Each structure stands twice: as structure tokens, then as C-alpha cells.
Image: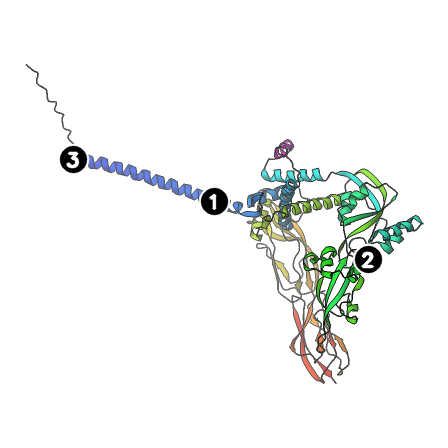
């Protein structure tokens, strides 16, 4: 018989009353507690993040931005502060902290310019080599220190500490004939100084005689505004008169004009004058000017010739046009007495810059390897920065933006001072504003570093009588009783550190008008009188506060001179005022015009 299947009956669980509700509520409590814990942790995390973010926010602000096709660099406050710390650690002991923020900013911009500009010029230093160099010195390897070291290495590479140097005599002549004439005179026995004084057209307005200063070839180019003369000096024999040698790169503040008037307008009344519309060509030598005159007289168009040979700025585009002139305002007054289209020249003019000239020079001494002086290093370093800047500026997108505000600089200086140790403090004030006798004075002294628990005092000397120092706020205030200068030493201190600073407050004597009366004048006769004031200030101004001066007279605000030619008789009353920038004084005066 088939077996019958057994039916397995599972025993049904029984739940005690209240059991489910009890355990369900426990689970809800656990979940709620977990959620609360998550929220608390999240809140703490957010709070910590917010605190850290607010602390780090000032450090992440962009201080200096450098943009270009090749370089996009944003230097933040952390970079700026860290660079200041490095620079301040190497600064001389008496470096004023108040000036250090700007100094650091300039150093950063100069460092980046040297690194980027040198790369454009084809000069580089491996960053890995710089890092190894810093490691070897035992100093921390940071981006800021790498940049500063890299810039120094690039300067050393391009400006060797020892270079060939020369002492020379030099003169610049405008033409080969003039240079040859000068050379003949030297060979005939005339001194270099005498010939130079008479003939030289050296750059700018000066002349150089026996130059006893040692210079590198690059310095020669810089001082004589040339890019070729240094090479000429370097290849010359010592003791021989070299030249004439033509230099088409040298700049000189001297030129010759060829001009003519093409239009004229006559004066219409006593307040205007004749005017001329003129055309002109600027040449670098008298001979070039004579050649231009010959071409013009031969029928050459002045505008076309100007585009070809004139050294006047814009001549290549505008031709010979020089605009309108009035008499006694230019070196071309002779044109007013000549018919239109009369060519005049050569007209020598010593403020018209031109290029080109012939060098005549003697190298007195030469040293093939001479150490640079600190002044030479500074001059050549600045020259390198200028070269790098010029190279970078060829990129039209290159731009340096200084985004530092005074608030950012103050924050940075506080961090620099505090880095010297807990409670470190430095007085920032190097100078105090002047005051005036009898006028309220107030100046709050500023300290960088520790901002709490500081006490201010005077450790030596005294304040001007009438002024006092608040020991808590560091404010000097009051009303000075007397004029004069008072020197004293300010001290700021806390439980960790103190700092002293020597300061001076100058109090001017109260300014007052001392002129009590003015002399009479006469219609049609020149008049002059000077207002006077009692003061120890060097700068003060005069004005007429009320009333009016006699018709035809005026007051010079700087000198206090009333001058002119009276036009109308009468008695004129007015009030004058003198102002030294701090205090003013007035006086009622009158002038009788007969």
C-alpha cells in the first residue's frame, strides 16, 4: 500500500502582548540615535571645516596674478607671506617693517620676471638642481625658496661676478668728417678734454671727458644709450685713439631740422597772434640735413622724403606734417618773416632725439677679470630685469596684476612678525605727521605682530608739551603749546617681547599773516607788493578769501606777490588767507589805486 504523506504542521509562534511594540520602539530609538549621531558628527565636521576655511581663506586670496600665453601664475597670500618671512630673515637689522610689504611685493614680481623672462631669452636653470642646492644648505625646500634661489642663480649665470672692465675717454660726433677733424686735432697734440667739450654730441645733454670709472661693456652701452658701443670698446687696443666708428644704435638728444611753412593765419585782435602750419624733417647730422635740402630744392616731395629719412616720431606714417605754431613758441620763428614754402635749415635743436653718430674713444686701461662692485651688480641686475620685461612684453596677453590691498599687506606683516616667536611685536611707524601750535593733534601708533596685551610707553625723551601717550591704545594726542621738534623713544611691550622705536614730532609755529598794510598804486604803472607770514613751514599758499584785488592785479599763490598794472582807480578792500595745510590765518587789507 502506498505510504501516506505525513503532513508536517509547523507550530505557530505566539507573541506575548506588548512584545512587538516594545522591540519596535527600541529599534526606532536606535535609528534615531544613529541619525542624531550622524547629524552631530556632520555638524562638528562642518564647524571644523568652517573654522579651518575661515582661517585659511586669507591665505588663499590671490596676491599677484601673472597672465600670458605661456605663463598663467596666480600667487596667493600664503606664497606672499612665506616669501616675506624668507626675505625678512635675511634683511638687515634696521629694516623698517612698514616698508617691507612693498619691498617683498617688488621682489616677488622681479623674481617671477627673471625666471619667465630668462626662459624667453633662452637661459634656464633646472628646478631639480635648485632643489638639490637648497637641500644641501639644510633649508626647507619650498616653492617660495625655490623661486628665489632660481632667480638668484639665473642672475649669477647672466651676470658673472668677475668681468672684463674698462676705463675710457669717449666723444660722439654727428658725422664722419667731424670725427676725422677731431681725431686730427688729438693727433696734433690737443687734449681729449678740450676737443670733447667743443665737439662731442654724447647722449643726453652731458659731455664726458677723462672717465676714471671702471665699466663693463654692458655698462658702457647702458650709460651711452647704445647697443654697439660696448663691443667696440671691448675689441679696441689700450692707449690708441679708436675711430671714427659709426654706431646706428646710439641715441643722442641732438638733431637738425629742415622746415618750411605751407599756411599762415593772421592775428585777429590783441589776444591772438599769427600762426603757421609747418612741415619738417628731423635729421641726425648737419650733413644729412644739407642733403635733404638739396633734394627738396631739386623737386622731391617733402612728405615722401620725410617718410624715408626723418627721425621725427610718426614721420613714417604722417610724413612731414608738424601742425600749427605761434611765434616765440618754437625754434622756427624765422619762418614768420619768410614767404610760404621757403625751405629753412639746417636748424640745430638740442632737445630733438635722433639716432646715429661716429665714436672717437681711447681705452685708457683694461682689466680682463675684475670683481663687480655692489653698485655695478645693482645696475646690471636692473638691466637684466628690464631685458626680461621687454622679452615678456612681446606677448600681447602678458600682464602683471598687483591685487594686494593695505589690509592684505597688514595681515601678512602680522604673520611675519609673529613667526619670530610668541608675542613678537614691532612698531611700524617710522615717521609721525607734523602738528601745529594750538591745533589739536592725534596719531595712533601701529604695531605688527601681537595685537593684545600690549602696553605703550616712552622710554627716553619727551613728547611736545601739551601732548600725551595713551598706554593702552598707543595714541598720541593733545594740543601742542609750542613750536619745535621733539625726539623720543616709544616702547611697546607685552609679557613675551618688547620693541622700541626712535621717533620725532615736529610742531610748526602757528601761521599768521604779518602784513598790516599795502602801498598805493597808480593806473597804468606796474605794481608789486609781497604778502608776508610768520611761520617755520616751508610750504604755504596764499589766496583772496573775500573781496577783490584792483583790476589788472593778481596774487601769486606760492610767493604771495601781488603784481600787475592797475587799470582802474579806486580803493579796493579784500581779505587774504594763508594756509600751510594744517592751519589758516586771514587778514583784511586794501590797496588804493590813484
Question: How far apart are the two marked residues, 3 and 1, measured between alpha carbons?
Answer: 55 Å
Closer mark to the observer between disc 3 and disc 1: 1
Circle 1 is placed at which residue position?
53
Looking at the picture, tell me which residue is in the foreground, 581 or 511. Answer: 581
Of badges 3 and 2, the one in the foreground is 2
Q: Which residue is mark 2?
A: 286
Residue at x-position 83% and y-position 44%:
167
What is the crowding at mark 2: few (fewer than 14 residues within 10 Å), some, or many (at least 20)?
A: some
Where's residue 199, x and y in %? 86, 55
Q: CA distance from mark 3 to mark 2?
A: 125 Å
Q: Quadrant of the C terminus?
A: bottom right
Question: What SS does tag 3 mark?
Answer: loop
Q: Nearer the viewer, mark 1 or mark 2?
A: 2
- Up/down of 407 relative to 538, above or below: above
- For the magenta stretch, what is the residue range? 122-136
Residue 279 at x, y percent in the picture:
73, 64
Crowding at dot 3, Cα within 10 Å, few <14 / some 14-19 / many 20+, comes out as few
**Cβ atoms under marks 1 and 2 closer than 8 Å:** no
**Mark 3–mark 2 CB contact (< 8 Å):** no
- Residue 17's disc number: 3
In terms of depth relative to the viewer, which is nearer, 85 or 206? 206
Amino acid at each position: 500500500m502506498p505510504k501516506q504523506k505525513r503532513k508536517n504542521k509547523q507550530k505557530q509562534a505566539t507573541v506575548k502582548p506588548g512584545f512587538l511594540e516594545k522591540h519596535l520602539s527600541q529599534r526606532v530609538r536606535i535609528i534615531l540615535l544613529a541619525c542624531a549621531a550622524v547629524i552631530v558628527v556632520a555638524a562638528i565636521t562642518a564647524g571644523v571645516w568652517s573654522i579651518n576655511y575661515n582661517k585659511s581663506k586669507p591665505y588663499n586670496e590671490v596676491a599677484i596674478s601673472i597672465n600670458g600665453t605661456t605663463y598663467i601664475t596666480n600667487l596667493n597670500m600664503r606664497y606672499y607671506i612665506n616669501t616675506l618671512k624668507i626675505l625678512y630673515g635675511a634683511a638687515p637689522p634696521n629694516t623698517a617693517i612698514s616698508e617691507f610689504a612693498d619691498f617683498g611685493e617688488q621682489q616677488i614680481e622681479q623674481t617671477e620676471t627673471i625666471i619667465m623672462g630668462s626662459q624667453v631669452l633662452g637661459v634656464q636653470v633646472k628646478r631639480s638642481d635648485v632643489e638639490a642646492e637648497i637641500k644641501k644648505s639644510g633649508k626647507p625646500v619650498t616653492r617660495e625658496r625655490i623661486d628665489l634661489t632660481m632667480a638668484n642663480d639665473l642672475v649669477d649665470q647672466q651676470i658673472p661676478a668677475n668681468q672684463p672692465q674698462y676705463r675710457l675717454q669717449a666723444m660722439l660726433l654727428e658725422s664722419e668728417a667731424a670725427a676725422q677733424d677731431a681725431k686730427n686735432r688729438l693727433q696734433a697734440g690737443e687734449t681729449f678734454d678740450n676737443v670733447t667739450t667743443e665737439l662731442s654730441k654724447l647722449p643726453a645733454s652731458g659731455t664726458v671727458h677723462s672717465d676714471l670709472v671702471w665699466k663693463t661693456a654692458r655698462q658702457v652701452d647702458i650709460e651711452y644709450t647704445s647697443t654697439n658701443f660696448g663691443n667696440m670698446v671691448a675689441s679696441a687696443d689700450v692707449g690708441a685713439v679708436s675711430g671714427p666708428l659709426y654706431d646706428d644704435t646710439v641715441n643722442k638728444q641732438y638733431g637738425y631740422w629742415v622746415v618750411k611753412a605751407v599756411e599762415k593765419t593772421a592775428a585777429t585782435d590783441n589776444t591772438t597772434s599769427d600762426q603757421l602750419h609747418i612741415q619738417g624733417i628731423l635729421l641726425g647730422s648737419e650733413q644729412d640735413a644739407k642733403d635733404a635740402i638739396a633734394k627738396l630744392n631739386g623737386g622731391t616731395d617733402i612728405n615722401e622724403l620725410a617718410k624715408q629719412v626723418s627721425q621725427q616720431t610718426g614721420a613714417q606714417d604722417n610724413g612731414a606734417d608738424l601742425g600749427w605754431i605761434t611765434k616765440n613758441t618754437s625754434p622756427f620763428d624765422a619762418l614768420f618773416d619768410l614767404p610760404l614754402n621757403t625751405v629753412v635749415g639746417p636748424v640745430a635743436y638740442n632737445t630733438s632725439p635722433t639716432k646715429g653718430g661716429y665714436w672717437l674713444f681711447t681705452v685708457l686701461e683694461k682689466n680682463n677679470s675684475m670683481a663687480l662692485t655692489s653698485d655695478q651688480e645693482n645696475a646690471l641686475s636692473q638691466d637684466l630685469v628690464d631685458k626680461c620685461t621687454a622679452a615678456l612684453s612681446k606677448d600681447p596677453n602678458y600682464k602683471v596684476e598687483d591685487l594686494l590691498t593695505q589690509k592684505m599687506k597688514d595681515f601678512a606683516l602680522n604673520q611675519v612678525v609673529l613667526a619670530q616667536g610668541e608675542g613678537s611685536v614691532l612698531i611700524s611707524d617710522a615717521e609721525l605727521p607734523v602738528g601745529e601750535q594750538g591745533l589739536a593733534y592725534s596719531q595712533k601708533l601701529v604695531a605688527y605682530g601681537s595685537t593684545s596685551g600690549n602696553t605703550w610707553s616712552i622710554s627716553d625723551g619727551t613728547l611736545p608739551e601739551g601732548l600725551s601717550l595713551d598706554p593702552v591704545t598707543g595714541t598720541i594726542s593733545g594740543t601742542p603749546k609750542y613750536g619745535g621738534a621733539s625726539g623720543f623713544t616709544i616702547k611697546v611691550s607685552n609679557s613675551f617681547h618688547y620693541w622700541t622705536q626712535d621717533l620725532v614730532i615736529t610742531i610748526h609755529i602757528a601761521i599768521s599773516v604779518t602784513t598790516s598794510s599795502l602801498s598805493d598804486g597808480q593806473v597804468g604803472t606796474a605794481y608789486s607788493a609781497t604778502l608776508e607770514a610768520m611761520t617755520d613751514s616751508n610750504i604755504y599758499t596764499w589766496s583772496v578769501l573775500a573781496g577783490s584785488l584792483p583790476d589788472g592785479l593778481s596774487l601769486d599763490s606760492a610767493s604771495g606777490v601781488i603784481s600787475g598794472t592797475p587799470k582802474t582807480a579806486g580803493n579796493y578792500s579784500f581779505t587774504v588767507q594763508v594756509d600751510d595745510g594744517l592751519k589758516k590765518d586771514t587778514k583784511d587789507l586794501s590797496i588804493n589805486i590813484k
